[in-house]
Amino acid sequence: MSIIGHLINGEDIQLDEPKQSVFNPATGEAEKSVLLASASTVEQAIASAQAAFPQWRATPPIKRARIMFRFKELLEQNADEICRLIGQEHGKISHDAAGELQRGIENVEFACGAPQLLKGEHSRNVGPGIDSWSEFQPLGVVAGITPFNFPAMVPMWMFPLAIVCGNTFVLKPSERDPSSTLFIAKLLHQAGLPPGVLNVVNGDKIAVDTLLTDERVKAVSFVGSTPIAEYIYATASANGKRCQALGGAKNHAIIMPDADMDNAVNQLLGAAFGSSGERCMALSVAVAVGDEAADALVAKMKQAMTGLSVGAYDNASNDFGPVITCQHKDKVNGFISSAEQQGATVVVDGRNPKVEGYDNGYFVGATLIDGVTAEMDSYKAEIFGPVLQVVRVKTMQEAMQLIDDHEYGNGTCIFTRDGEAARYFSDHIQVGMVGINVPLPVPVAYHSFGGWKRSLFGDLHAYGPDGVRFYTKRKTITQRWPSSGVREGASFSFPS
Amino acid sequence: MSIIGHLINGEDIQLDEPKQSVFNPATGEAEKSVLLASASTVEQAIASAQAAFPQWRATPPIKRARIMFRFKELLEQNADEICRLIGQEHGKISHDAAGELQRGIENVEFACGAPQLLKGEHSRNVGPGIDSWSEFQPLGVVAGITPFNFPAMVPMWMFPLAIVCGNTFVLKPSERDPSSTLFIAKLLHQAGLPPGVLNVVNGDKIAVDTLLTDERVKAVSFVGSTPIAEYIYATASANGKRCQALGGAKNHAIIMPDADMDNAVNQLLGAAFGSSGERCMALSVAVAVGDEAADALVAKMKQAMTGLSVGAYDNASNDFGPVITCQHKDKVNGFISSAEQQGATVVVDGRNPKVEGYDNGYFVGATLIDGVTAEMDSYKAEIFGPVLQVVRVKTMQEAMQLIDDHEYGNGTCIFTRDGEAARYFSDHIQVGMVGINVPLPVPVAYHSFGGWKRSLFGDLHAYGPDGVRFYTKRKTITQRWPSSGVREGASFSFPS
Amino acid sequence: MSIIGHLINGEDIQLDEPKQSVFNPATGEAEKSVLLASASTVEQAIASAQAAFPQWRATPPIKRARIMFRFKELLEQNADEICRLIGQEHGKISHDAAGELQRGIENVEFACGAPQLLKGEHSRNVGPGIDSWSEFQPLGVVAGITPFNFPAMVPMWMFPLAIVCGNTFVLKPSERDPSSTLFIAKLLHQAGLPPGVLNVVNGDKIAVDTLLTDERVKAVSFVGSTPIAEYIYATASANGKRCQALGGAKNHAIIMPDADMDNAVNQLLGAAFGSSGERCMALSVAVAVGDEAADALVAKMKQAMTGLSVGAYDNASNDFGPVITCQHKDKVNGFISSAEQQGATVVVDGRNPKVEGYDNGYFVGATLIDGVTAEMDSYKAEIFGPVLQVVRVKTMQEAMQLIDDHEYGNGTCIFTRDGEAARYFSDHIQVGMVGINVPLPVPVAYHSFGGWKRSLFGDLHAYGPDGVRFYTKRKTITQRWPSSGVREGASFSFPS
Amino acid sequence: MSIIGHLINGEDIQLDEPKQSVFNPATGEAEKSVLLASASTVEQAIASAQAAFPQWRATPPIKRARIMFRFKELLEQNADEICRLIGQEHGKISHDAAGELQRGIENVEFACGAPQLLKGEHSRNVGPGIDSWSEFQPLGVVAGITPFNFPAMVPMWMFPLAIVCGNTFVLKPSERDPSSTLFIAKLLHQAGLPPGVLNVVNGDKIAVDTLLTDERVKAVSFVGSTPIAEYIYATASANGKRCQALGGAKNHAIIMPDADMDNAVNQLLGAAFGSSGERCMALSVAVAVGDEAADALVAKMKQAMTGLSVGAYDNASNDFGPVITCQHKDKVNGFISSAEQQGATVVVDGRNPKVEGYDNGYFVGATLIDGVTAEMDSYKAEIFGPVLQVVRVKTMQEAMQLIDDHEYGNGTCIFTRDGEAARYFSDHIQVGMVGINVPLPVPVAYHSFGGWKRSLFGDLHAYGPDGVRFYTKRKTITQRWPSSGVREGASFSFPS
């Protein structure tokens, strides 16, 4: 059984450390195992990053960017292999993995613009003969801690931008599906990255806590669940670091009576069930305004869902794959059952689907539940499974109140043709990423990703312009050149 | 004895709460007392800010900005009164108070540009027929906690910008000199600010902790000492808030052999002793490169310091005033004595100066200490008094190492004529605000203020462009309008 | 009879020059006369601006901006007098003049942000140890040539921004209504502007040509009719100057079948007839999609127009005033008659209205013409009178084609509730300023004003961010500081 | 003899048109000939670009950018062939061609950032419930006219950026060395560019005039000599187009007494003689401050120049190659002779060098002339040959006056160690591109290129941020969505 180690200072590292199995969720078999880094292994990675920093910081941004240009080429050339690795360990179907990878590549494309993005502000004559300007300098060693559900994309939200800004990086990917992440990290070295600039350590809480407390680490980016995000943010901050920690979500779509219903249904199919709903932007609640809209929605969804097929990653005709673990399958099923018990109607039941040849896979079929209310457990929690719940309300205002009352505020969407409804919604809703007839309003790479309320802790969003600001510190220089003949009187007042 | 209360919902509030004396540091007499808010008083202020938020958020930025235009006029018209209030409670001389006020006004001027500063980014065709844009929306209730040393300026680093961005504000100024702050807050109401948008509560740790833990407060800006800054940052972050906490400083000037020495001495006089050195940007250490430069510096400084006069705020011929409290006077004197005991030479001794008619004032005269080393207690600490210490080094590299080794990284300066030395210094020094022949490199209001290392906790600096980003949250909208005839197929892949 | 002269180098100048009468268009009487500058007078103004430039250029932007802060106060304090002067010479009603003035003041507010707006771009390490940055430096002497219809606003689109950027200015306002412009220019001096920075010369083509050909003038901003704009652009360019020349307009509103018709009618009343239609953004053509919409529109407009009253500027209950000259009145009436003769229906006829006590005023009442087609003379020309023409089309596409086929492309608007229609319209229409349910889509001062097609010649729009770029020239500095020990080999290749 | 045709709508086009020989300047032999397009051929190219525009405009910027990513790869893979083609027709040595190409590629890299660069500005609530934003939309068909001296780089200053902004392009390269330009254009098609988006026509004044007058062409970018630039600017403007026309140069370096002389000499060698001085940024005048500096400079230059070798492009040990034509060789020699006759001293004489095996080549050797004055013909003109002239002055002020008095203002440089001198120089000198110890201060691709005075006509510089603005037109949309219940009163005043 192959063992997945670490990538430190440009080299594969395998040490005598505890291991954890890495499963193929379609078969339920453990085909590989991954090392769990000790504190000293993580410290070695940090030290490697620390050592690489001065030289990397001094490398002109355009030279750093050119490595990203080559990285993009290599990612495209190796797309199939990356998707295969994602499929084997995460379970998502190849076309979905390709979509994830493409989104990751878009962040590399954005990072290629570093020379433009790193421009500071220059002011001539802030006073007579005095100039002032700001530079955005790199922080030093920064860390990223990433989740299982996007093993290629989420790491690429972080390290390309951090690195192109002049930082060095220690990445701790999810221990459930680390292979594609490691493979990608090696491609970056192949593209010309000097050793030590990007290090990958696999591990668990020990690795995380080492990154959060080591004083050489200047900043931490995290994506995961809200309780962990909260812990990361509090701990990193208490250790004096800057931190952005992205947590959970419960994304609602409002279906207005004037919505193009066929379009909405088509959009919801992918947004709710794609990647088995294991996306922080998955659209898991449809809020129908008026029973007429609700009835139409449920009928059309039910009909449309008959065409969906769940199965293994390597059959491209499948729509989505298994969930990540056996325990998670049970949890998702449990939420479906609890909704049923608490009074909702399971319109389409995805529990225990039959997937030919994959009896031990962690599959849950596409599920539609009608008549869900805000009090139900299945509504309150982020299920992270292929389950779409329908809540029925009487007015748009009621729908918006529901969304605003939820603890999460990651993404949301409205389906309507009406300009006024869309503007009122996007202006007032307490959610960070808003779609208008767009069910997965993930910002493109040149904007920034972030939720509101308990979906994000920190003041800067991930990637895009906010990412550049997060991965740099401002230095402001004020300059005056005395001319030989000039002698000025001392001033005891605060300069005005 | 007059009692200083709170300003909540546009009204003066005096409650039955504990009081603390407010002293005139030039006379040592307690002429007023200030209420220390209970938790419920602070909560009342927060509730007032919360209630004012929806209406204020909906007010167009240009209308908000126009209140700032009027506020600027009122500040200028009332400058004398503001400076008098500062002088009475803080002790700084009127010309110095005027400088502080002017710097505060510059932040109001910057806030007048809100409509320009709040522009979001718009992208047409992020995909076919899909547009995306970002808005910078206000956070809600935000809090500011400010220090005694700039009772007018530091609050105006915060609330004008926060408010013009659409937030409502609760300010807790220093309980040592709250009157000018309160006066200024009232002027803003006179300029047309609706009640509840800016609230001022006086208090101590109880007030602070209430602001840090109340979940209605979305962000906290702090300026003070590093231990408190660290506490504020950790506590606010653990409570899920965004936070920027500015702490202490130890600002060094490097005196290069080629420096224009007369100019440097003139600049240092004000930078070291102005406002009795009670500035986080005070220049308290001169690092002379080579004994020749050091000898010249000490001789010229000694000579120049003979002209300095310390005294009460209302005599404009004084150069600087008393320190803030009796205890602080003792502490400053203690550092001078410790340097002496640890081997340094007190060239000019400001301990216990004679100030005619002010026998009980907390005065310390301008003090020059030569031969200071990095091991001395007086070097390690931020003295916050009119004390300039000279450290002698052999090379510029040694000088830079000294600066980089210090825990603080707020401001620094180099005196030289040489372009190469200046550029090397500004590029590499681990300090956030760098002066080249400018001893107090406080960024102008349209840049941003912030130190590095343990001088600032957080990722965004104070005021200027960073201030706008700190006081707003990003919302990204992605919009597609379906045309009636179009029906698109569902996509189960992550959109690329 | 009072004589209106020039303002050169801060002084009122009256020379022995030809004069032209300035009429009160409500009475038809010539109450004042204005001097028409000779070439040498204009050259004197240019020389004055040239002489003032070096000192003004060296004044820090924040100091320049503070004069604009005071200018804003003075404009607000003198609003009544300014509106009176506008009304007397232009004829617009006081409430309309106040609106114009307010729009002008908004450009002054924008100019107050100069320090932020003038920031250049700074890049550290464009190569190893090499920095590069851009500064936006003033041009020198720039000229503005402005039309009669906004004697306060259009000049304030130009000179506040040009001046705050560090340029000096020669303004040639319309000779029909110069008094408010001159009054405003004097207020700016009262606000602290040094003599020579802003000069006003009254005149005709001689003055214009002098400005266009004098080599000391570096840039020309013009607003007027298209034939003149074209002449200005060609002539200024042939003389090596940068130029922006804004010309005529024919602004269409599309009325979609789903429009909120009452709202559309209310909006159109002001947009079509306000200021007698003498606005380059006046909405003079309503394109109704479908006869049902057209019939409703015409019926409701006819009804709504019964409430309109035309009269003299000083009666605030009037809706709009006379047109600018007797000749222009005849021209407007002529277009109405021609439409009638060419087959259109004059639904409401404003020719020769009765205005009690103003028998000789140049009044035209609000006029509504139905059944207009693209072939009619009244459709092709910019009438610049209170005439709204209705064109009936069958589809939105046909409406858009009509707009795109017109030679002008200044402003346009669509009335609809439909998001898709609005987006398709705003994306594709060949017009520079687009309203969605906003009939006069004049960009706010912090955006920029400009049409497309033959409505604007040049590459940068007026005021706002484009204005800053127009009034500055880019200087890019690349800097390397050789260190003493370093000697580099010569490179004969183009540096890469 | 091979014939070089046009590239229209993605196809090689050879028509029955007049031809002109294309020479190898090292051998003096005509190895190819180039077609000179008739007006109808150019119109065909314009029509092709016009036809391709709607689809290309609708292509999302990120898709357009990805073609540029692939273009960069292809340029790098084909670098040798491109350099060979440049060398054969232009004569520059392979290492110099590689430098030129690399600079061109940098503009492609910048163009890859289009999605970020094309962002518009979005303002929420410019009034209650009213939003406004600006989009930067493509112009349509734009034209580029480029010179012989950089057949790869200058075209790539233009078309990659214009195209990535959504425009379609007609390029007329120099008829002296069109092959590398055509080759590059074909690579862009290979990278995926749709036919018609980029068209290349070879030709002379007929082609130029067609581009300048055809109304389908919306903008013209030109680089060449000042008289032609002036003609282009006047003609394009008179035809209502936007235009940027870059002309000649006379770039001075000030050698201060404190300069690092060895470094200055090393830098000047390449800057004066590289590419035979046929660069608009060539450093052709050294202004030495003080005779001591002048004597040292001349002595060291003379010594250093002994190592230079002139010869054919394919021998990489050569420092530079022939000039472009026989006539030009005679002209350069003539300027050297005229300086001699007018009193200057030819220290190193490059007239008629012996180049083994290339008797008919158009070679001029590196030439150094001392004692040049502002009155000499060789000083006034742009020689465009490998000739460095030394002017001796007494003060820096005199040196700056000399530079400011020259009609050109493209580039300039100062060699000094002194911060004050450098800042004074860069602030005040009337030149658009300033080097501090950098003799060829060509802005990097993410800044913009442009001279002042008669070196550039237009308001926006070439490439970089200004290039984006030049190749786009601003559209400002103002949007309000009426809510059903709301009816607002009409307003006859100008909205404030």
Image (cartoon, coloured by chain):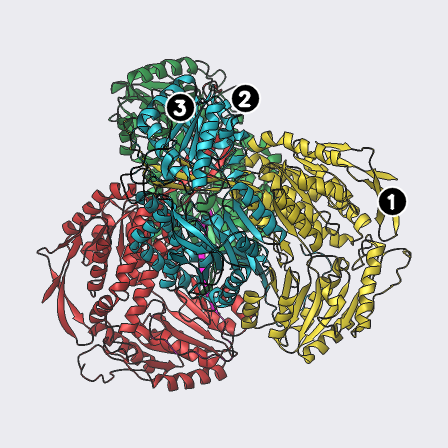
Chain colours: A yellow, B cyan, C red, D green
- Which amino acid type is marked by label 2? Ala
Q: Horizontal and vertical percent for residue D75?
A: 59, 37
Query: Which structural element holds mark 3?
Result: loop
A86 vs B251, nearest the viewer: B251
Q: Which residue is mark 1?
A: A31
Q: Which residue is mark 2?
A: D316
Q: Looking at the rendered structure, which numbered label has been put on residue D386?
A: 3
> Do the residues at pointers 3 and 1 share their chain?
no
Q: Residue at x 85, y 56 (%)?
A: A362
Label 3 is found on which chain of the structure? Answer: D
| Category of crowding for the residue at label 3, using alpha-carbon neighbours closer than 10 angstroms: few (below 14), some (14–19), many (at least 20) | many
Q: Residue at x 63, y 51 (%)?
A: B238
Q: Image quadrant for the N terminus of chain B? A: bottom left
What span is in magenta?
D468-496
Q: Residue at x 85, y 49 (%)?
A: A24
- Which amino acid type is marked by label 1? Glu
Label 1 is found on which chain of the structure? Answer: A
Q: Horizontal and vertical percent for residue A489?
A: 29, 33
Q: Horizontal and vertical percent for residue A228?
A: 71, 51
**How many angstroms separate mark 2 from mark 3 (CA)?**
18 Å
Does any portion of residue C466 appear in the rendered image? no
